[in-house]
Image: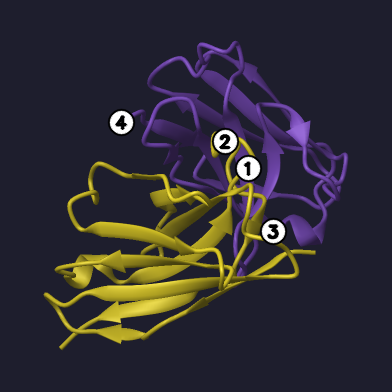
Amino acid sequence: QVQLQESGPGLVKPSETLSLTCTVSSGSISSYYWTWIRQPPGKGLEWIGYIYYSGSTNCSPSLKSRVTISVDTSKNQFSLKLSSVTAADTAVYYCARGGAGTTRNGMDVWGQGTTVTVSS
Amino acid sequence: DVVMTQSPLSLPVTLGQPASISCRSSQSLVYSDGNTYLNWFQQRPGQSPRRLIYKVSNRDSGVPDRFSGSGSGTDFTLKISRVEAEDVGVYYCMQGTHWPWTFGQGTKVEIK
C-alpha cells in the first residue's frame, strides 16, 4: 500500500519561502498525479496544485504567482515551495495522490499532514 | 471559481439513524466527457481526509456500503443509511470539473 510522508520546517518567518517535500514509499511515483492541499486551523480544505510524474504542473490561480511544485522521480519525491508567506499561509499541508490519468476524481491516498506556522 | 455549498454545516444524528448531506454547486458539474466530477471526503477528528466516493456515486474500496452518493448537474447528496460511531467527523464535497477544483465548507457529523 503506497504511503506518503510530508517533511519540512514547521515554522517559517513572514516574507520567506515555505518548502515541503513529500516522499512516496511502497509504490512508484510514476504514472500518477501528485497534489498539495492545505487546511488552515479550524477551516476547510484548499487546493494548492498538482504535478504529473513527468513534470507538468497546474496550480490554483489564487496561489500561482507564489507556488512552485516539482518532482524528483529518482528519489520518489515531489516538493512544494510557497514564496512570500504571511500568517494567512499558516495551515496543515497535505500531500496526496491524484489519479493515474486525472486529478478530477480527487485524491485516494493522503499523507498525515504537516503543520506549518508562519510567524516571526 | 465554482462555489460548493454544503448543508447543513452541523448534523447531530442518533446512532443507527440515517443521515443526509447536501452539496450544491454554482455551475453544472457535467464535464465535456460526459462525466460528473463530484467527490466526497471524510475527515475523522485528528486524521487526514479520506475519499469515500468519486464521480457522484462510486464508492472507494473499503468504504462501507452504508455510504452512498447521488445527484446530478448542480445538486448532490451523500447519505449514510445507519450512522455508526466511527462516522463522526467532517464531510467535504469536492468538484473536479472546473479548475481550480474546489471544496465545500464541510459538514460536521456528530452523535446526539
- In the rendered structure, the answer to whether residue A120 lies left or right of residue A21 reads left
Q: Is residue B53 left or right of residue A53?
A: right
Which circle marks residue A102 in the picture?
Answer: 2
Of the residues shown, which amino acid type is indicated by label 1?
Gly
Mark 3 or 1: the one toward you: 1
Instruction: Mark 4 or mark 3: name the one nearer the start of the chain.
Output: 4
Residue A119 located left or right of residue B39: left
Q: Chain of mark 3?
A: B
Whether callout 4 and callout 3 share a subunit is answered yes
Residue name at image x 41 percent, y 82 percent: A8
Q: Are marks 2 and 1 on the same chain?
A: yes
Q: Which chain is yellow?
A: A
* B30 versus A10 height, above or below: above
Tag 2: residue type?
A: Thr
Query: Do the numbered discs 3 and 1 sit on residues whose CB atoms are within 8 Å?
Result: no
Cα gap from disc 3 to disc 1, whole angstroms:
27 Å
Q: As shown in the figure, which amino acid type bears the numbered disc 4?
A: Asp
Which residue corresponds to mark 3? Answer: B88
* Front label number (4 vs 3): 4
Q: Secondary structure at mark 1?
A: loop
Horizontal and vertical percent position of residue A77: 53, 69
| Residue located beneath label 1 in the image | A99
Q: Say yes or no: labels 2 and 3 on the same chain.
A: no
Residues under labels 4 and 3: Cα distance? 29 Å
Element type where label 3 sits in the image = loop
Q: Which chain is purple?
A: B
Mark 2 touching mark 1, by CB under 8 A?
yes
